[in-house]
Amino acid sequence: MAERINRRKFIKNTLVATAALSLEEKALFAKPEDSSESNEKKAGKPMSMGKIGNVQISRLICGGNLISGYAHSRDLIYVSPLLRNYFTDEKIMETWSICEKNGINTCIIYASDKKAVKLFKRYKDEFGGKMQWLSQTKPNTQYMERSVGEALEYGASAVFLLGNMGDRWTFDGRVDLIEKFVNCVKKHGVPAGVACHSIQTPIAVETAGIDVDFYMKTMHSENYWSSKKPEQNKPVIDNYDVDNYWDMTPKQTIEFMGEVKKPWIAYKVLAAGAIHPGDGFKYAFENGADFACVGMFDWQIEEDVELADKMIKQSEKRKRPWCG
């Protein structure tokens, strides 16, 4: 019987000597024990922090799309099911644990994803997790108090309006609903935020003088191949089907948000994996973002934290002052 070939060893021996490793290859070749040893050494080491209201937040935030099994995968129809199979309950809690060990103290969870919300509570109650969560919320216009209450019931440290809703209400001329949502959150004593893809949303909110505590705004360069598709001639709110861009006007985002005196969390900074973390973090932090929300697999966290901290330090003297 022929000797069984170890795939990992075979690929490593035949490729590594002749070419630099891609991120995917590094993940393939990495030994599981290497990651755990590194995380153990780094346990308790905080990364750069900021504040939204009285809530201290790591400048790199763990996003919620991946753990909820949702991927901006363009035309790759298998990716979301792949995520749902990869992120078992155990893997999700392991991911949060690795985040904590690397200094990330905050994650984002969609309030309507009851499975994720309850799992997070279990992570804290049964396993002593110290993470805090920011609630992404899609409120019912008739039962706004109930929508906000559902998030706070499970201990969210802040509540913000889902980006799709922020854009939709802005485009529909219903900024009054955004103000109603913000006031509903703030009366509970936690920071209230507004997320968006279109720069018109924060422009409308600021023009209306709404007392929002923070923004979440998409932020990335256009330096990736799928950002150039000809279909992208419609406003982002009407073109989600293209699923390959989230900030159609990055220069306008940088210019307008540069004048906003409120904390700003940048998201989609890696354009769903189309931009290298080093480039994405550099672009976001140099151009004014106070925090970056990124969906991460467990094996990406340590490197992402190191890259984010490096780019934050390099951005200390940036043009927009740190607002969080």
Image (spheres, rainbow, N blue to C red):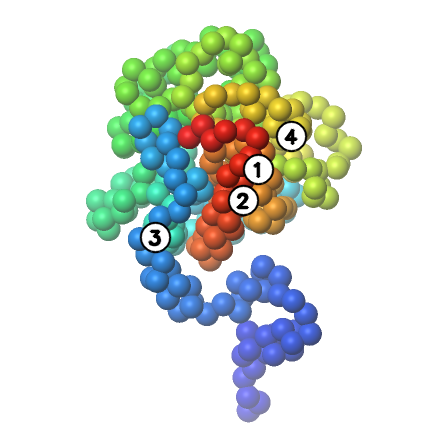
Count residues near mark 1 (Cα–Cα under 10 Å), then give few for <14, some for 14-19, many for 20+. many
N-terminal of the pair, mark 2 or mark 4, is 4
Where is residue 255? Give x, y as percent. 62, 24
C-beta proximity under 8 Å, tags 2 and 1: yes
Count residues near mark 3 (Cα–Cα under 10 Å), then give few for <14, some for 14-19, many for 20+. few
Amino acid type assigned to the residue bearing label 2 in the image: Gln
- According to the picture, the residue beneath numbered tag 3 turns out to be 45
Q: Marks 2/3: CA distance?
A: 19 Å
Q: Marks 2/4: CA distance?
A: 21 Å
Where is residue 279? Give x, y as percent. 61, 46
- Residue 130, quarter of the rendered image: top left
Amino acid type assigned to the residue bearing label 1 in the image: Glu
Q: Secondary structure at mark 2?
A: helix
Q: Marks 2/1: CA distance?
A: 8 Å
Between circles 4 and 3, the one closer to the viewer is 3
Viewer-nearest residue: 73 or 11: 11
- According to the picture, the residue beneath numbered tag 2 turns out to be 314
C-beta proximity under 8 Å, tags 2 and 3: no
Amino acid type assigned to the residue bearing label 4 in the image: Pro
N-terminal of the pair, mark 1 or mark 4, is 4
Q: Secondary structure at mark 4?
A: helix
Residue 43 in view of the camera: yes
Q: Residue at x 53, y 69 (%)?
A: 29
Which residue is most to the bottom? 1
- According to the picture, the residue beneath numbered tag 4 turns out to be 250
Q: Marks 4/3: CA distance?
A: 33 Å
Q: Residue at x 47, y 9 (%)?
A: 209
Q: Secondary structure at mark 3?
A: loop
N-terminal of the pair, mark 3 or mark 1, is 3
Between circles 2 and 1, the one closer to the viewer is 2
- Residue 190, quarter of the rendered image: top left
Name the mark on residue 286.
1
